[in-house]
Image (spheres, grey):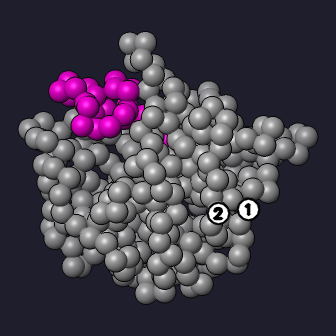
Amino acid sequence: MSQQGNALPPLRPDAFTDPYRDPVWDGPTDPILVPDHLNGEWVLFYTQRRATKPGLTGVEWVHGTAIGIARSSDGGATWNYQGTVDGLVPPEAELPATLWAPDVVRIGDQWIMYLTVLGGVRTDWTGNASIVQFASRDLMSWEYLGQIELDSPRVIDAAVAFCGDGRYRLWYKDEARGSNTNSAVSDTPENPASWVLEGLTIPGRPHEGPKVFRLEGTYWMIVDEWRGQAVYRSNDAAGNWIRQEHLGGLILTAPELVEGRPVVGRHADVVPLAPTEDGKERALLVYFTHPCWGGEDIHTMEPDPRTRLSHVRAAVLEVSDGNLACREH
C-alpha cells in the first residue's frame, strides 16, 4: 500500500479497459469507486456474489455475500484485490448475513457507507432487507451507526447525494412497492434517525440501482432497468425528474455481445473525471456486466453456471446536445 500523504493519481478515462474480476468467486457486482487521499489510491467496493461456488441452489449465489474491496495506485488501469470488508454485519442481523450494494459518500471529515443488509441465505427472493449506515475515517475500519427507518420490509440499493436545495437525499429501491425508486431527505445524513421519507421518485417500469450525480450544470439520475440504464434529469435533484427522450432514455444497452446478442450494463456508479482540454465536463460510469449472459431479468438465466459470472467495466459519460451520452471503451 502507498505511504500516507502520497498524491492521488487522476482517475483514467480508460480505467477498467481490462475488466475487473473477483479472484475468489468471479462475481463482482454493484461497484462503487472512491478516492483514498490518505494512501494515494482509488478504492473499489462491490458486492461479492458467489458465482462459482458449487452446490448452491436457486439464488443462494447472490445471498451470503460479503463486500469485496480492491485498490488501484495507477488511476484505475490495474486493480489489486484486498479481500472483504470487516465489521459490516449489524449486531441485530440474522446470521449468516447477506450484504448488498454499498454506497460510500464523503460527508464532512468522514466517509459514510449506506449498505443493504438481509438476514440469512435464501434460495429465493424472500426475507426482509434494510439499509444501514457505517462511518469510517480511513475506508478500512467501519463503525456501525444504525438502521434507516424507511417504512418498508424490503429496501435495497442506497444512493446518497447532496442536492441543489442544500439538503442530502437518499434514493433506494422499494421492492414492496413496485420495485420503483423512492427517496428520503436529511440535513444530517450521518445520523440514521434523521432521514424523513419523501415517497415515490421514479414510478413506472420496475428498476433498481439508482445513482444521482451532477454534470454540466444538470443533476442526472440513472437506474438499472435490466435492459440498460434509464436516464433522468432534474434542475436540483430535489424532485421533478424528467426522463431523457434520446434513444428511448437508455444508455449501456449493449456494451458487450454474447453470441451476437447484446449484454446490458448493470447497477452503476458515476465518478467525476478531469475535464477535457476545452473544459468540457465528463465522468466515469463504472458498471458490471454478465459476460456470458445478456443481463436481463435474472429469472431468465440459463442453467449454465457461466451465466452467473460478472465483471466490472467502465465508460465515459458526457453531455452532448443536452443529452447524457455514453462513450464506451
Marked residue nearer the N-terminal end (2 or 1): 1
* 232 shown above or below 136: above
State yes or no: residue 148 in magenta: no
Q: Secondary structure at mark 2?
A: loop
- Tell whether 245 sits left or right of 274: left
- Percent across and percent down for residue 46 are 41, 51
**Which label lies toward us, 2 or 1?**
2
Q: Which residue is mark 1?
A: 235
- Percent across and percent down for residue 81 are 41, 46
- Tell whether 243 sits left or right of 1: right
Residue 23 occupies quadrant: top left
Q: Residue furthest front?
A: 204
Q: Which residue is mark 2?
A: 240
Task: Tell me what residue is drawn at x 71 percent, y 76 percent.
Answer: 165
Report the magenta residues as a range.
287-310
Q: Secondary structure at mark 1?
A: loop
* 241 shown above or below 291: below
In this orientation, which residue lies closer to the viewer: 328 or 295? 295
Question: Does residue 280 show up?
Answer: yes
In this orientation, which residue lies closer to the viewer: 104 or 155? 155
Q: CA distance from mark 2 to mark 1?
A: 8 Å
* 41 shown above or below 329: below
Name the residue type under label 1. Answer: Asn
Task: Tell me what residue is drawn at x 48 percent, y 56 percent.
Answer: 203
Name the residue type under label 2. Answer: Asn
- Tell whether 122 sits left or right of 267: left
- Percent across and percent down for residue 7 are 70, 56
Q: Residues within 10 Å of mark 2 (few under 14, many from 20)?
A: few
Whether residues under marks 2 and 1 lie with C-beta atoms below 8 angstroms apart, the answer is yes
Residue 298 occupies quadrant: top left
Task: Tell me what residue is drawn at x 78 percent, y 43 percent.
Answer: 322
